[in-house]
Amino acid sequence: MDTIVSIWFPPGQPPRPRGKGRHVPRQADHQERRREIIEALWRVTERDGLTGVSFREVAAEAAVSVRRVQYYFGSKAQLLFAALLLLGERIVERGMAGMRASGPDPSPDALLRAALIGAQPIDEESRTYLVLFFCFYIAALTDPALSGAVLSSQQWIHPFMADLIGKAQQRGETRDGIDPEKEAVLLLATNTGLSLGVLSGLLSPDQAIGTIDYRLAHIFRRAVRTPDEPPSRRS
């Protein structure tokens, strides 16, 4: 799971420490101000898209001066990068919480399921985070300033899934004849499509979770859940 955390933090920029020390109150206040400005940027983005983001709009949303935004972030590019990092922290924490809930020694099947469902918009918070992520993702396709941070942060997902499926295959927990690399590609594409389907209203969260279970049942040796079975139960 350390890999999942590390991909959102460039070399030399580890997650912020939470220790005790003489300067912690001042640092905590500094980080709180940054967080409030970033969350204001998220609200502007959710309402108007990334094209609506400017120092002036973010400052107005955060109820601070433009000078205060410039003090903490320097440039719009730095503000967007900081917003992406914090968004990554929040998304990763949701996925890791699901993985921790899978038990002290979860199977590759359980870990994959937790990671996939953690990336679905199944409640208001996750819906907001995914709308924001897709805003950044789409913008990165045409904005060189964002492309490196956004697109490279996704490159770990396919190897991570393929590795879990491969380990399960070595343990005899998968169906015969599967290809871990191709199955990981299918899972990644399926999960992205399901997320967009739920966000657009074409699918319900329960339909997305049921489809994830259906796909996983074609990889791992386990029964497919029935439609009326609660998602939290394991087969």
Image: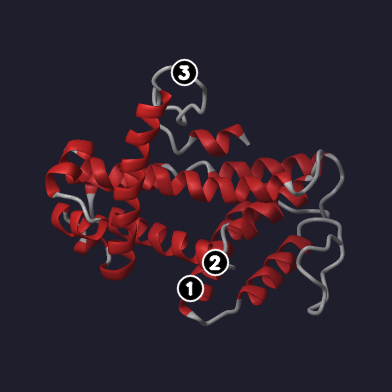
Residue 220 pos. (x, y %): 80, 55
Disc 1/disc 2 C-alpha distance (Å): 7 Å
Q: Position of residue 82 (x, y in %)?
A: 32, 42
Residue topped by disc 2: 121
Which residue type carries mark 2? Answer: Pro
Left or right position of 140 against 122: left
Give the distance between the C-alpha atoms of the residues marked 1 and 3, in whole angstroms.
43 Å
Q: From the viewer's perspective, tell me whether residue 227 is left or right of residue 52.
A: right
Q: As rendered, which of 31 and 137 lies closer to the eye? A: 31
Quadrant in the rendering for residue 208 = bottom right
Instruction: Report helix, strand or loop for mark 1.
Output: helix
Q: Residue at x 63, y 45 (%)?
A: 96
- Label 2, residues with CA under 10 Å away: few <14, some 14-19, many ≥20: many
Residue type at mark 1? Leu
Residue holding disc 3 = 21
Please tell me which residue lies in front, 30 or 11: 30
Where 175 falls versus 163 (above or below)? below
